[in-house]
Amino acid sequence: MRIAVVHGPNLRLLGRREPAVYGTETLADVNALLSEEAASLGVELEFFQSNHEGEILDFVDAASARVEAFLVNPGALTHTSVALRDALTGVARPFVEVHLSNTAAREPFRHHSFLSDVAAGVVFGFGAQSYVLGLRGLVARLRKVNPA
Ligand code: DQA
C-alpha cells in the first residue's frame, strides 16, 4: 500500500517558522517520523512539498496513478483553495487532512476548511503527531475497506 504525503505552502519553513505555533521540528523531522510509522504499519510513503498551488494540483493528479490515498497538510490552501478540493475529489482517492496547529483556536479565517467535509478524516492540534495519527487513521480505514 502506497500513500503520498503532501505538504502545502510554507511547510518547508518548519523549525524556524513561528515555533510557538508550529514547534521546532523541521519538515525533514516530520517526514522521518512518518517514515518510521510507515515502516511499522507496513506501508510505503512518498513525500511532496510545494509553495505553488498548481504544482500541488499536478502532483495530486500524477500521484493518483500510483498511490491509494493522500495524507495532506494543505497549509494556507486549506482556507482558500476550491481547486485543491476539486483535485482531491477528482482523483477519487481517500485523503486525511492534517494540521500541526489547532486551527479552531486561531484566527477566524483559519476556522473554515475547503477540504474537511470531503476528507476521510481530519487531525489537528498535535504538532508533528497530527501527521502520525492521521497516517494511522488513514491506513486503518484503507485496510477496513480493502482487507488484504
Ligand atoms: C497549518 C495551518 C494553516 O492555517 C496555516 O496556513 C499553515 C499550517 C498547520 O499545519 O497548522 O500553513 O496547516
Image (cartoon, rainbow, N blue to C red):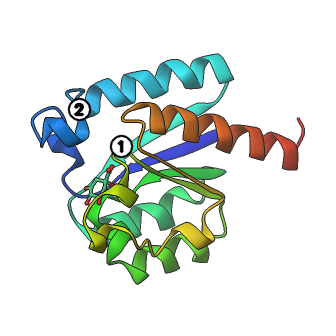
> In 3D space, how far apart are the residues under numbered discs 1 and 2 (Cα atoms)?
8 Å
Ligand 1 resides in the quarter of the picture at bottom left
Name the residue: 59% across, 57% down: 95
Asked whether the beta carbons under mark 1 and mark 2 sit within 8 Å of each other, the answer is yes
Please, what is the three-letter code of the amino acid marked with disc 1? Leu
Q: Residues within 10 Å of mark 1 (few under 14, many from 20)?
A: some
Q: Which residue is mark 1?
A: 100
Residue 7 screen position, x and y as percent: 34, 50
Identity of the residue drawn at 41% across and 51% down: 6
x and y percent of residue 48 in the render?
A: 36, 47
Tell me the quarter of the image containing the N terminus. Answer: top right
Dot 1 lies on which element? loop
Q: Is residue 1 visible?
A: no
Give the camera-side residue of 31 and 20: 20
Q: Is mark 1 within 8 Å of ligand 1?
A: yes
Q: Earlier in the sequence, mark 1 or mark 2?
A: 2
**How would you rate the neighbour count of disc 2 (Cα within 10 Å): few for under 14, some for 14-19, many for 20 or more?**
some
The location of residue 54, given as percent across then percent down, is 30, 73
Rendered image quadrant of residue 118 = bottom right
Does residue 139 sit above or below 26 in this rendering?
Answer: below
Q: Is residue 37 above or below residue 20?
A: above
| Rendered residue at 66%/44% (across/down) | 138
Can you identify the residue that label 2 sits on? 23
Name the residue at 49% across, 75% down.
Answer: 85
Q: Is residue 95 above or below residue 13?
A: below
The reply to whether the residue tagged 2 has its Cβ within 8 angstroms of ligand 1 is: no
